[in-house]
Amino acid sequence: MKRILTLLAATALSSAALAQSFTLKSADLGGQLPARQYFNGMGFGGENLSPQLAWEHAPAGTKSFAVTMYDLDAPTGSGFWHWVVFDIPAEVTELKAGAGDPARKLLPTAAVQAHNDAGLPGYFGAAPTAGPAHRYMLTVYALDKMLSLPPTATPAYIGFNMSGATLAKASLLVYGQKK
């Protein structure tokens, strides 16, 4: 009996070790932001195109997702929210490139694209100041509920509402620099 229990315990540990973790990937992003993801203005000639993002292995109980892009090094004293999307249905596992442009209508119907820190709805491309590279954190959150907030909710308020609902999150860190 002891041998059977030991075998069952070893099997359970092996299964846990093989469990997949919640992961965020992008066909558009590597270590550096490509020109397409930069803002078109303020001295930048980018396409202001939000990147393609895909995620997998969401935890059980996920009811919705949220996606954010945040510049940790913006000279504001509080960073800069470039993109916030929430209430993405649980069955969705990808946002296509350009989904951050409200005119393209590439988001799932239920998803809400909030205003970024420039006060505009949708994606606001990278526009780093001169000097050291800026770090841009793209994160997908698996949430245990729909947030049901208005699109005019600030990124900080959305983050506050996500804090108690987050089951897991996965991030990509990319760098952008003014040349």
Image: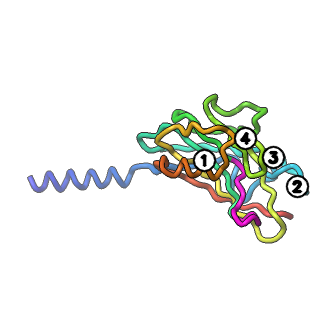
Location of mark 3 (residue): 48
Q: Nearer the viewer, mark 1 or mark 2?
A: 1
Q: Quadrant of the C terminus?
A: bottom right
Q: Which mark is residue 100?
A: 4
- Secondary structure beneath dot 2 equals strand
Location of mark 2 (residue): 44
Secondary structure mostly seen in magenta is: loop
173 or 110, which is in the foreground?
Answer: 110
Q: Which mark is residue 158?
A: 1
- Quarter residue 133 falls in: bottom right
Residue 114 at x, y percent in the picture: 68, 42
For the point 75% across and 64% down, which residue is it?
76
- Secondary structure beneath dot 3 equals loop
126 or 144, which is in the foreground?
Answer: 144
Q: CA distance from mark 4 to mark 1?
A: 17 Å
**Kind of residue at badge 3:** Asn
Q: CA distance from mark 3 to mark 4?
A: 9 Å
Q: CA distance from mark 2 to mark 3?
A: 10 Å
**Kind of residue at badge 4:** Gly
| Labels 4 & 1 near each other (Cβ < 8 A) | no
Q: Earlier in the sequence, mark 3 or mark 1?
A: 3
Q: Residues within 10 Å of mark 4 (few under 14, many from 20)?
A: many
Q: CA distance from mark 1 to mark 2?
A: 29 Å
**Kind of residue at badge 1:** Ile
For the point 73% across and 48% down, which residue is it?
116
Which span is picked out in magenta?
A: 73-83
Is residue 149 a member of the stretch shown in magenta? no
Q: Which mark is residue 80?
A: none
